[in-house]
Amino acid sequence: MEDEPVNIREYEEIAKQVLPKMFFDYYNGGAGDEYTLRENMEAYRRIMLRPRILVDVSRIDMSTTLLGYKMHSPIMVAPTGMHKYAHPEGEVATARAAAACNTLMVLSFSSSRKIEDVASSCNAVRFFQLYVYQKREVSATLVRRAEEYGFKAIVLTVDTPRLGRREKDIKNKLILPQLSNLDGLVSVDVGPKGGSDLEAFASQTLDPSLCWNDIEWLRSITSLPIILKGIITAEDAIKAVEMGVSGIVVSNHGARQLDYSPATISVLEEVVKAVSGAVPVLIDGGIRRGTDVFKALALGAKAVLVGRPILYGLAAKGEKGVKSVLKMLQGELELTMALCGTTSINEITRKHVQTEGEKLRSLL
């Protein structure tokens, strides 16, 4: 019997072995030189933990709420596309695993399974991620379907007026399957093949004119809460609050858009301070350990979203692998909380971490 993976890194290695190179590179690659891709993870490693001792940690409560919905832990499933590249059941397997772990999944607009299929696969709270298309009725139709099938919020991705330069996809001539949620709405036939199908599709369909005024348009077509995903500055965070959104995701799109943008964990505190508690702030990008989750919570995140590790688990072992990844991260977070002397999420504070800047100042 083969050894079970004991960390996310080992799941990544299995995924690399079992997936075709084109698909693994699509999941794992970043934009440009992939500096931000590496930095998303490295920045977590430069933050140190400050444990408190002699605290009764015989009972640990990791539960939290988001927009009134209770979760077993503050670890959510991030929106990532085309799960059928990893496993034949695609997002249905991911949704079942998330439900089994009592966590919240954000379904990607580029899901390889229909909104309706995912909604009917299990009983769980889910959000829907939206892009805005040049043909606005396409986006409006997706929103209506998500609302009809019980999704509880719209997560609007706001960092993609154009697709970032993903050189691995270009080199591999990434093949884009018909996206099931776009059947009858948008064709993925991008004409003569030259590079990445995804890049060509995005350039022909996504709306580069998307701006702040369009938040009002989105609000006019749905009663669901709107969360903006892709904010990494205080200025944009303040503007988002002024626009009346219900939440913010500090995100650089998994380092797949603008290379040399900052690691998300390095700007989290800036965004948290800017919103001053007006809306919950979430974060994604670079999370590979329960200690990373703890660090994000200490710097003010309400919850974290995990993307690539979910895909590694799905590729390696299907639904079972996704469950394993989520339970692994939950277990690591619980252990970190115990060893840091915190018994609930609310007890995790800024005093439990030391950032790189603080370490340098302490040497002066």
Image: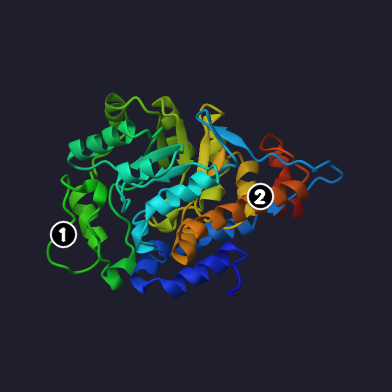
Q: Which residue is labeled 2 in the image?
A: 333
361 or 257: which is nearer to us? Answer: 257
* Image-quadrant location for residue 298: top right
> Is residue 293 in view?
yes
Q: Residue at x 49, y 44 (%)?
A: 99
Q: Position of residue 301 (x, y in %)?
A: 57, 40
Q: Nearer the viewer, mark 2 or mark 1?
A: 2
Task: Give the Cα distance between marks 2 and 1.
Answer: 44 Å
Q: Residue at x 23, y 36 (%)?
A: 141
Question: Residue 80: image x %, image y %?
Answer: 39, 52
**Is label 2 in a helix, a strand or a loop?**
helix
* Residue farthest along the left direction in this orientation: 191
Earlier-in-chain disc, 2 versus 1: 1
Which sits in the foreground, 231 or 305?
305
Asked if 183 appears above or below 256 in the picture, the reply is above
Kindly identify which residue carries mark 1: 190
Residue 45, percent across and down? 63, 59
Q: Position of residue 131 (x, y in %)?
A: 30, 43
Q: Helix or strand or loop: what does disc 1 sit on?
A: loop
Q: How many dots with numbers?
A: 2
Left or right for 231, reference 40: left
- Density class for disc 1 (Cα within 10 Å; few <14, some 14-19, many ≥20) is some
Q: Amino acid at mark 1?
A: Val
Query: Viewed as shown, does residue 61 lie left or right of 169?
Result: right
- Three-letter code, disc 2: Leu
Q: Is residue 121 above or below residue 220?
A: below
